[in-house]
Amino acid sequence: MSNDLFSSVAADRLRQQAPLAARLRPQTLDEVVGQKHLVGPGRPLRRLVEQDRLSSAIFWGPPGTGKTTLALAVAGTTQRAFEQLSAVTAGVKDVREVIERARQRLGEHGRGTILFLDEIHRFSKAQQDALLAAVEDGTLTLIGATTENPFFEVNAPLRSRSTLFRLEPLDREAIVLLIGRGLVSESARADADAIALLADRSGGDGRQVLTALEVACALAFPGTITVQHVESALGTSALRYGRDDHYDVISAFIKSIRGSDADAGLYWLARMLEAGEDARFIVRRLIVLASEDIGMADPMSLLVAVAAAQAVEHVGLPEAQLNLAQAVVHLATAPKSNRSALGVWNARSMVRDGAVGEVPAHLRDAHYQGAASLGHGTGYVYPHDDPRGWVPQQYRPDEMVGVTLYEPTTHGFEQEVTTRMERHLSHPINATDAIPQTEDAP
C-alpha cells in the first residue's frame, strides 16, 4: 500500500514538473486542438476511434502538429490496452516484448493492444519487419508517428497494412486557443500584442508555441507577458508582419522573381523566413510561378520548384532555407514566358463561353465492338507510322479550327519550341502521302 502511495505521489510531482506542452495534452478527442479534417464531427479518424475500430495507422505531419497528442487521445478513448515506444530508444527486443504481452492479453482476456511507435521512421527495415507479422495477424494495432514521408521511410508491406492520416500545421485559430489554455494553466496574463506575436511565429507548431509561452511566463512572473518577453523567449526580434504584410510581402516576392531580380527575391524570402512565414506556403507560390511566369522558356524551373518543395518536407527549416534560396535564384534568372499559362486561361474562357464542339469522328474511341459501324476512328492517321513522327490532321472540334491558344516566345527554350512548331507548319504533306492507320494504332 505504501509503495502504491509513493508511486502516486511521484507521478503527481512528475506531472507538475512536466513541460507545459505535456501537461496540456488532451485525454479525449474532444480536447484535441486543430486537425478538424480528422477529428471533427463525422470525420474518419473520429468515427473509427469512437467505434473502437481503428486499424493500424500512420500519423504523418510536421513537428508539433499533434501526432503524439492524437495517439494519447485514442488511448483515452479505446477499450484496448495501450503501449508506447519511441523508435529513438527502443529496439527489436522491446518490440518483441510488447508483442508477447499483446498475445498474452489477447489469449487470456480477449483484449486487443494498440502500440504507439513514435518516430517510426528511425526504425531500420529489420526493426520494422519485426512488427509486420503481429500487425498482419491482428495481435497488434500499430499507430506510427513520423515527420518524414512514409512512402520513403516506412516499409511498403507495413505501410500497405496501415491507414495514412496526414496532419496539417495548426492554423491561427488553433494556436490562439492553445495559448489561451497555456495561460490558464500557468495562471498568467498576456498582452494582445504578445499573444499575436506568439501566434505569428508559431509556424503551425503547437509544441513550439507552448514552449515559448512557458519561457515567457517565467520571464514575466509575476507580471503580464509583453512583446518583449515573447521576443526574449523566441530569441528573435519581432518584425512587423501582420495580415496585410503577409500578402504584400509575398506579392513583392513573386513580382521580384517575375522581374528577374534575384537579389530582391532573396531579400523578400529572408523577410518571410525571419517573420516565421510557413515555408510550405512560400514554396507553393514558387511552384505556381514556375509554370505561370517561366513555363516553356525553361521547363527545368518547375522541376527545381517541386524539388524545393520536397526538400522543405524532408529537411525542414532552418536547413531548407538553402533549398529555397537556390530555387529563388534559379527562377529569378530563368528566361520568362507566360504563354502556356495564357493558353490554358484562354482555352477555359472559350469553353465557358460555349466552345464545346463535338469530338471529330476519327479521334473517337474505336476499341469497342460496334465503334467501326459508327465511323469512330475511321480516317485516323497514326503519327508514329510517318518517318517525321507527325501528320497534319485535325485534332480539334470544327469550331476551334484556325484558333491559336499557345504562341511561344523566342525566350530561352521556347525558341526551340517555336522552331519545332514552324517546322510542322511549313512541311505539309498531301492526303495521298498519309499512311493509313494500322490495326494496332490506338
Image (cartoon, rainbow, N blue to C red):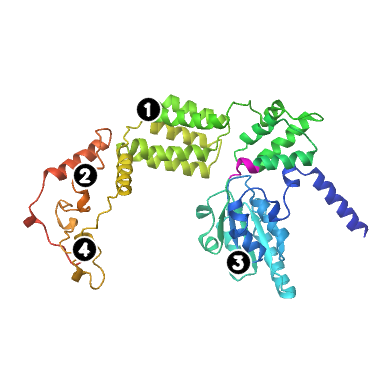
Q: Residues within 10 Å of mark 3 (few under 14, many from 20)?
A: many
Would you name the residue on which mark 1 appears? Answer: 260
Q: CA distance from mark 4 to mark 1?
A: 45 Å
Q: CA distance from mark 2 to mark 1?
A: 32 Å
Would you name the residue on which mark 4 appears? Answer: 441
Would you name the residue on which mark 3 appears? Answer: 135
The picture quadrant where one finds residue 127 is: bottom right
Q: What segment carries the magenta color?
A: 169-174
State the image coordinates of residue 316 (x, y, percent, origin top left). 55, 40
Image side of residue 171 versus residue 256, left or right: right
Classify 295 as above or below 134: above
The C terminus lies in which quarter of the figure?
Answer: bottom left
Mark 1 or mark 3: whose residue is earlier in sequence: 3
State the image coordinates of residue 128 (x, y, percent, origin top left). 58, 59
Q: Amino acid at mark 2?
A: Val
Q: Residues within 10 Å of mark 4 (few under 14, many from 20)?
A: few
Mark 4 or mark 3: whose residue is earlier in sequence: 3
